[in-house]
Amino acid sequence: MGRIRAYIQINGRKCWTLFDTGARNTYVIPEVARLLVSQKLPRSFPAALGGSTQRVREHAFLVGKIQGHLIATQAMVIGSLGRDEQGRPIEILLGALSMQQWGIIPLPRDEKLDLTHYPREFLEY
């Protein structure tokens, strides 16, 4: 599993993001969700992250830029994502499905993201 930390820019605000291939879904904290279009879910459901379980009651449409590349993806709003190894609060956890959709490959050895597979167009068959 590869985990890289970097910023995603949303509406001019830099949000500290954990890119985690071990997580399927993408999550944002409420402070980030306020920058996005969000909606309450008809019912809540549990999400187990970092050894604790929280209830997800809202989802948001995350639109932002990673190293100048636009992304748009579904995100679940969750109360807290914890802190990284340096004690910095994580604001967004970008999961494997979003990374796959946008061709983002974490390179843990180099501690950076590979965006060479970023789609220039979507071909649907």
Image (cartoon, rainbow, N blue to C red):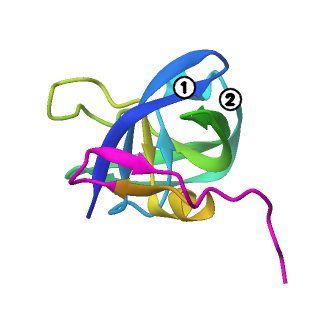
Of residue 52 and residue 114, the one placed in the foreground of this image is: 114
Label 2 environment density (alpha carbons within 10 Å; few <14, some 14–19, many ≥20)? some
Q: Disc number at residue 32?
A: 1
Indicate left or right for 48 with 65 as reference.
left
Mark 1 vs mark 2, CA separation in Å: 7 Å
- Residue 113 at x, y = what percent? 41, 48
Amino acid type, residue under disc 2 in the picture:
Leu
Indicate left or right for 121 with 105 as reference.
right
Q: Is residue 48 above or below residue 85?
A: below
- Residue 122 at x, y = what percent? 79, 65
- Residue 107 at x, y = what percent? 32, 55
Task: Classify mark 2: helix, strand or loop.
Answer: loop
Q: Are marks 1 and 2 in contact (CB under 8 Å)?
A: yes
Q: Is residue 102 above or below residue 31?
A: below
Q: Is residue 110 above or below residue 15?
A: below
Amino acid type, residue under disc 1 in the picture:
Val
Q: Disc number at residue 104?
A: none
Magenta-span inclusion, residue 75: no
Quadrant including the N terminus: bottom left
Of residue 106 and residue 83, the one placed in the foreground of this image is: 106
**Residue closest to the far front:** 116
Tell me the residue at 50%/56% (across/down): 104
Q: Which residue is mark 2?
A: 36
Stretch of the chain drawn in magenta: 107-125
Tell me the residue at 33%/38% (across/down): 5
Magenta-span inclusion, residue 116: yes
Tell me the residue at 69%/59% (across/down): 119
